């Protein structure tokens, strides 16, 4: 591996014009493809195998044209103080709004609140419902705009008007200001780490090019592959973070090779052969983690994972080819590591750096450091025991949004459960008396706790399928509503002479959360298992990969514990702008496992391969740890700070989901890089000594020799060395 990449790096350095032309051509091709690609249009969201999805599919068959999975919108009206919505003037205003909405595109139907009894008991609040023929994620922007502006005339008359429903799903706002600040911090860290603006600019430039190619390719294929906007958001986030990191490691190693006295082409080859090997295997772990999302069997997650994995592959290829080419263009503008200090002091760079001093401290007290790190992360992880999963709804939006205000108005006028009605589908096709079966279901639901309203059954034209709407007494994301769904499925369905299915947005969210929870252990086993095997090949050790996997589990549990404490319990919520606590987004555990595992293995590979390299070249286990920290700790810390800055930028988003993802990933990187990799890892290796690098002889013979440490390059040096160099000239 190292020898092949060494040759590749030197080739890219010498043929820099050709390499640069290839990447510019790919960027142009991807950009043209994205610009000329048809609009993505509607994207489907399905969860195969869940009861809620089965019910949606059944409704599509039995109620053709009803758009069972179509988006819905609600416009809520509140009369001024002392007035009622039933006043003639207000009724006329609402009727005008109903007509205006009914003329819009993608609209299937609009209800009139005064003919559907959608007015609160005190008469102060009323609402109309809009049904669309496309799912929420596929609605056109013009349709959403029409829904938002349709109430302007009503507002002008003095009514309070707010809009909610899944039709007005806010597009993910990544927090542009925070993201810009994160990139600025990344740039400053790169300048400090690499010593010049040009050296710092290379990782930023190549990461942006890689993300641009990846995201443009996703946009090009969005229509054909039914990709949503969140796909490119995730791919961009991950691609930017790993793209900067991978380029940083190669540029940093290049400067170190220059400091050893090698010429620039040789230094590029060495950097690509050694650090590049680590980049390849680190990238493979990220790809495994992201592609492994397909085991969840949710098409949306599978597409997101594969698209993000593709962007990571692009980042690896750019680091291995474009970085060497750009280093050729930069020439002497990128200086050897420590050159400035040597010029200032006039001495060689032999003084121990901070990484060396820290590693020496850990080696002297490994048991204490290990105990402190494990106990500290374990304490932070304790809130995970109270983890509640769910999906965000309008009730988790900031109070400044119209969706949240509409949600609160409906809760005020009709009760909190009104925001999450359940749809019961009664499949009585095989029943002797469909109407009696539907009546049994209706009566059974009325006898359950936490039920406010049960509408009469509505049958299709064939008379073999009925729908019943149930309004719970609790808000959609509450545990009581989840218990009600299970009670209907378990108790009521068992007594009916028909198949009873529960669906609707609330039930779909519950099923989605359950499916993700059930998939977490198989996903963990697959990802950690494959990466464990990969790391055995890289490190040629059993205990080092095992320690890496256990350390990751500790850091991700601690990160999830912090997420629960902030977003579920409200700790430090005011500081982070968390306006509403509630269940943790159901995708968060699997999402964090996938992303954080890949990033954690990045740090593991970059840090420990340098230790392995020193150990293979004859140093003692303790010396190898110090050497690894001497050469890698500064760069790993810089990479972690950059990643935290990029992810931390998303905390400023007004969207609770994006804010939660940004915080969770940033805190996970903090725990994994600074506690696990920089403290627990050297402590464990110090305690294990030579045993850390033990591998059974039969397994050693069976495993391929990938030579991540560059041993092949060193052997080549010895072969190429002039045998007369060490001979003394003797006068005869």
Image: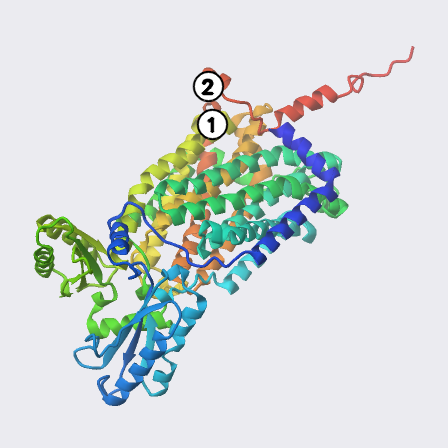
Side of 29 relative to 153 (left or right): right
Q: Residue at x 57, y 33 (%)?
A: 610
On the question of residue 214 being in view, the answer is: yes
| Label 2 secondary element | helix
Q: Residue at x 32, y 56 (%)?
A: 391
Above or below for 732 versus 541: above
Q: Which residue is mark 1?
A: 536
Side of 170 relative to 207 (left or right): left
On the question of residue 373 being in view, the answer is: no
Image-quadrant location for residue 447: bottom left
Nearer-N-terminus badge (2/1): 1
Residue 358: image location, x then y, percent: 52, 40
Looking at this view, name the residue that lies furthest to the right. 732
Query: How far separated are the C-alphas under marks 2 and 1?
Result: 10 Å
Q: Which residue is mark 2?
A: 699
Residue neighbourhood size for the residue with mark 1, other residues' Cα within 10 Å, grouped as few (<14), some (14–19), many (≥20): some
Q: Give whichever of 170, 371 is nearer the camera.
A: 170
| Label 1 secondary element | helix
Above or below for 459 versus 117: above
Image-quadrant location for residue 268: top right
Above or below for 256 versus 3: below
Pointer 2 and pointer 1: residues touching (CB < 8 Å)? yes
Residue 473: image location, x then y, percent: 17, 64
Side of 12 relative to 520 (left or right): right
Q: Residue at x 67, y 49 (%)?
A: 24
Side of 551 relative to 731 (left or right): left
Quadrant in the picture for the C terminus:
top right
């Amino acid at each position: 591996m190292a020898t092949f990449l060494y040759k590749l790096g030197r080739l890219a350095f010498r043929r820099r014009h050709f390499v640069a032309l290839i990447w510019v051509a790919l960027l142009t091709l991807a950009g043209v493809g994205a610009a000329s690609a048809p609009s993505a249009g509607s994207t489907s969201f399905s969860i195969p195998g869940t009861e809620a999805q089965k019910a949606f599919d059944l409704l599509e068959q039995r109620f053709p044209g009803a758009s069972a999975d179509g988006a819905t919108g609600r416009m809520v009206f509140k009369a001024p103080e002392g007035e009622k919505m039933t006043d003639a003037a207000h009724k006329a205003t609402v009727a005008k709004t109903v007509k205006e909405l009914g003329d819009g595109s993608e609209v299937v139907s609009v209800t009139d609140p005064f003919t559907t009894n959608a007015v609160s008991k005190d008469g102060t609040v009323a609402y109309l419902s809009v049904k669309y023929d496309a799912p929420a994620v596929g609605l056109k922007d013009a349709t959403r705009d029409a829904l938002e502006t349709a109430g302007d005339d009503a507002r002008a008359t003095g009514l309070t008007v707010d809009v909610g429903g899944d039709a007005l799903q806010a597009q993910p706002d990544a927090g542009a200001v925070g993201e810009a600040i994160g990139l600025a911090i990344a740039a400053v860290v790169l300048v400090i780490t690499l010593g010049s603006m040009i050296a710092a600019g290379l990782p930023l430039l190549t990461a942006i090019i890689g993300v641009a190619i990846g995201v443009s390719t996703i946009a090009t294929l969005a229509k054909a592959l039914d990709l949503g906007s969140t796909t490119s958001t995730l791919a961009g986030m991950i691609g930017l973070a790993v793209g900067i990191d991978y380029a940083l490691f190669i540029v940093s190693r290049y400067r170190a090779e220059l400091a050893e006295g090698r010429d620039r082409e040789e230094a590029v080859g060495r950097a690509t052969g050694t650090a590049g090997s680590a980049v390849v295997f680190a990238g493979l772990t990220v790809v495994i983690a992201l592609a492994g999302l397909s085991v969840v069997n949710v098409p949306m997650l599978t597409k997101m994972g594969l698209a993000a994995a593709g962007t990571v592959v692009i980042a690896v290829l750019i680091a291995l080819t474009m970085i060497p080419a750009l280093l050729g263009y930069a020439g002497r503008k990128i200086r050897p590591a420590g050159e400035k200090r040597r010029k200032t002091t006039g001495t060689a760079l032999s003084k121990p750096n901070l990484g060396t001093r820290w590693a020496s401290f850990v080696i002297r007290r490994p048991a204490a450091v290990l105990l402190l790190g494990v106990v500290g992360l374990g304490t932070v992880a304790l809130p995970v025991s109270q983890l509640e999963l769910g999906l965000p709804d309008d009730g988790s939006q900031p109070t400044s949004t119209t969706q949240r205000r509409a949600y609160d108005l409906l809760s005020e006028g009709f009760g909190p459960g009104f925001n999450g009605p359940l749809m019961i589908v009664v499949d009585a096709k095989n029943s002797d008396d469909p109407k009696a079966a539907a009546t049994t279901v209706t009566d059974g639901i009325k006898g359950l706790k936490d039920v406010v309203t049960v509408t009469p059954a509505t049958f299709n034209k064939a008379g073999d399928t009925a729908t019943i709407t149930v309004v719970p007494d609790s808000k959609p994301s509450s545990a009581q509503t989840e218990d009600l769904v299970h009670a209907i499925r378990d108790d009521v369905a068992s007594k009916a002479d028909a198949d009873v299915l529960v669906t609707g947005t609330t039930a779909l969210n519950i099923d989605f959360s359950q499916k993700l929870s059930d998939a977490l252990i198989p996903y963990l086993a697959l990802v950690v298992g494959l990466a464990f095997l990969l790391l055995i090949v890289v490190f040629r050790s059993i205990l080092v990969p095992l320690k890496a996997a256990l350390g990751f589990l500790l850091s991700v549990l601690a990160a999830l514990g912090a997420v629960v404490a902030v977003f579920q319990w409200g700790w430090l919520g005011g500081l982070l702008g968390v306006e509403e606590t509630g269940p943790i987004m159901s995708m968060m555990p699997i999402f964090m496992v996938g992303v954080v595992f890949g990033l954690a293995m990045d740090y593991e590979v970059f840090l420990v391969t340098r230790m392995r390299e020193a150990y293979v070249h004859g140093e003692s286990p303790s010396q190898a740890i110090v050497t690894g920290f001497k050469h890698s700790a500064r760069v790993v810390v810089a990479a972690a700070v950059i990643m935290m800055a990029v992810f931390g930028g998303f905390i400023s988003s007004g969207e609770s989901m994006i804010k939660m993802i940004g915080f969770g990933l940033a805190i996970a990187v903090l725990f994994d890089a600074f506690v696990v990799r920089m403290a627990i890892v050297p402590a464990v290796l110090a305690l294990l000594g030579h045993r850390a690098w033990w591998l059974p002889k039969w397994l050693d013979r069976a495993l391929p020799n990938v030579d991540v440490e560059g041993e092949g390059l060193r052997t080549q040096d010895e072969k190429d060395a002039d045998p007369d160099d060490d001979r003394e000239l003797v006068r005869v």
